[in-house]
């Protein structure tokens, strides 16, 4: 980790992640928003949250704040919450030309004694992937950039 911003520092109007970080691996730097699900938000709240992330990309406001659109990492408390958030993320993506670089996991996967890589382990899934289809996050995975999807979206408007 080479940078960390708390929720207050990285909030932008309706976009309110729990934090923003930059991870360096070799010469590559990857920014990410962190969302930590404490079980206080319902499906409607998450739909609004993901809508704010899409608007942040479509309006290209992220360009004044970051070098590229950060990945969004969501850590939940349990498997049921992870699946609920995945369903909402899939619904929020309907009609969007670009895709959020969104990955989900549960806190227990991070803390699991067999996961020596913690957050960098093969514990993340995409919302449209099978529950057990796990991958690495950030530069380890070569996750797709949302900004490329946003350029495509901008050109169609």
Image (tube, helix red, strand yellow):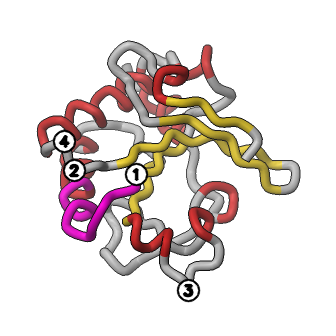
Label 3: few (<14), some (14–19) or many (≥20) C-alpha neighbours in 10 Å = few
Query: In the picture shown, does residue 8 fall above or below 38?
Result: above
Could you tell whether 48 is left or right of 4 in the image? left
Instruction: Name the mark nearer the viewer: 2 or 1.
Output: 2
Q: Residue at x 40, y 56 (%)?
A: 75
Q: Residue at x 56, y 35 (%)?
A: 20
* x and y percentages locating residue 19 in the rendered image: 51, 35
Q: Are marks 4 and 3 in contact (CB under 8 Å)?
A: no
Q: Is residue 34 magenta?
A: no
Of residues 103 and 119, the one drawn nearer to the viewer in this rendering = 119
Residue that carries the numbered disc 2 in the rendered image = 39
What is the secondary structure assignment of the residue under circle 4? loop
Residue that carries the numbered disc 3 in the rendered image = 114
Label 1: few (<14), some (14–19) or many (≥20) C-alpha neighbours in 10 Å = many
Could you tell whether 4 is left or right of 134 in the image? right
Single out the residue that lies furthest toward the right. 27
Residue that carries the numbered disc 4 in the rendered image = 41
Query: In the picture shown, does residue 134 fall above or below 69?
Result: below
* x and y percentages locating residue 151 in the rendered image: 52, 29
Q: Are marks 2 and 4 in contact (CB under 8 Å)?
A: yes
Mark pair 3, 2: CA separation: 26 Å
What is the secondary structure assignment of the residue under circle 3? loop
Of callouts 4 and 3, the N-terminal one: 4
* x and y percentages locating residue 107 in the rendered image: 40, 65
Q: Which mark is residue 74?
A: 1
Name the image quarter holding residue 97. top left
Instruction: Name the mark nearer the viewer: 4 or 1.
Output: 4
Name the image quarter holding residue 86. bottom left
């Amino acid at each position: 980790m080479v940078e960390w911003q708390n929720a207050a520092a990285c909030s932008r109007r309706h976009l309110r992640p729990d934090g923003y970080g930059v991870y360096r691996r070799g010469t590559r730097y990857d920014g990410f928003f962190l969302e930590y699900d404490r079980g206080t938000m319902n499906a409607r709240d998450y739909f609004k949250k993901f809508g704010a992330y899409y608007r942040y990309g479509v309006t290209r406001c992220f360009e004044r704040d970051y070098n590229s659109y950060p990945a969004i990492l969501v850590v939940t408390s349990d498997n049921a919450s992870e699946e609920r958030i995945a369903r909402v993320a899939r619904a929020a993506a309907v009609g969007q030309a670009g895709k959020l670089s969104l990955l989900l996991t549960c806190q227990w996967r991070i803390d699991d004694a067999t996961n020596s890589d913690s957050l960098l382990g093969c514990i993340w899934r995409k919302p449209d992937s099978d529950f057990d289809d796990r991958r690495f996050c950030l530069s380890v995975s070569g996750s797709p950039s949302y900004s490329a999807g946003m350029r495509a979206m901008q050109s169609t408007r």
